[in-house]
Amino acid sequence: MKLTVIGAGNMGGATARGLLSAGAVAPADLTVTDANEKALAFFKEQGANVTTDNRAAVAQADMVVIVVKPWVVPLVLEQIKGIDLGGKTVVCMAAGVKPEVILPSLAEDTDLIYVIPNTAIEIGQAVIFVSPYRAREEAAQAVAALFGRVGLVKKVDFAHLGGAISLSSCGIAYAMRYIRAAVEGGVELGFYPGEATEVVCQTVIGAASLIAAHKSHPEAEIDKVTTPGGLTIKGLNAMEEAGFTDAVIKGLKAGSK
């Protein structure tokens, strides 16, 4: 399969690097495009095809992944206007771009599938929401299989894409903000920043791994470390008093609009 990734910025670059690293696509079968040639240097070194010409890249592809800023999508569609996209799969990773913006540029037999990952796709640890909008089953399965090489794939209907974006794509930033806050707290407790970062990151990895391994509710794992009258419950209650849970839920809702 010939794959073209349009956009080598933060998310596009992470996507292409992740797919290459996982062996999900051979360098010779991957084409990466970007207006900035410097952004393409890494992929050229890896043996992938690189170009600033979106038309040429799309024409020879079986699957086209559009990973640019939402307001750039119409420009990309204008650039590839007139190319026969029949039988191809177009994957849109641009958040908030509605189907009616994309569909007029596609052939009737072009598969349109929305894919929402987060930046951990670069290291094969992403959560990736796949939403087939107008697609054959085999095309949807091919997309899910491809991205399943670089993370956990969850299928979601188009109506829930906003929530998917907030929970995972934005959510990785929310998790990092907790890590940053905990590191700052660790420094106040007397740890050097590097040491605090190492401890907090491993603690978060451990917490997530316990829940995943036990398939348990987070509160069940919390109960195991909250001794009556102990320090953990005092810390948790202080966080709740400051609005921790409420702030997280409000942030998720805000990020889904």
Image: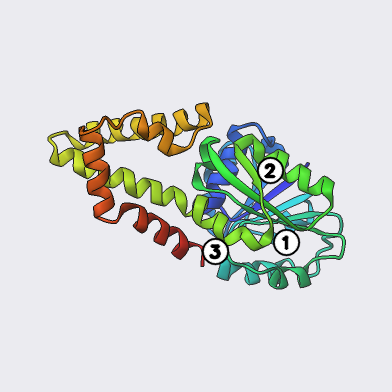
Tell me the kind of residue under disc 3.
Lys
Q: Is residue 241 left or right of residue 220?
A: left
Measured from the top left, where is residue 227 in percent x and y?
A: 26, 29
Q: Residue at x 47, y 54 (%)?
A: 170
Q: Secondary structure at mark 3?
A: loop
Q: Residue at x 38, y 55 (%)?
A: 248
Q: Secondary structure at mark 1?
A: helix
Quadrant hosting residue 113: bottom right
- The answer to whether mark 2 and mark 1 are in CB contact below 8 A is no
Measured from the top left, where is residue 39 in percent x and y?
A: 51, 51
Q: CA distance from mark 1 to mark 3?
A: 18 Å
Q: Which mark is residue 30?
A: 2
Q: Secondary structure at mark 2?
A: strand
Q: Nearer the viewer, residue 219 or 198?
A: 219
- The answer to whether mark 3 and mark 2 are in CB contact below 8 A is no
Which tag, 3 or 2, sits closer to the chain's start? 2
Q: Which mark is residue 113?
A: none
- The answer to whether mark 1 and mark 3 are in CB contact below 8 A is no
* Viewer-side label of 3, 2: 3
| Residue bearing the label numbered 1 | 55
| Residue bearing the label numbered 3 | 69
Q: How is the image coloured?
A: rainbow
Q: Quadrant of the N terminus?
A: top right
Q: Residues within 10 Å of mark 1 (few under 14, many from 20)?
A: some
In the rendered image, the vertical position of residue 61 relative to residue 225, given as above or below: below
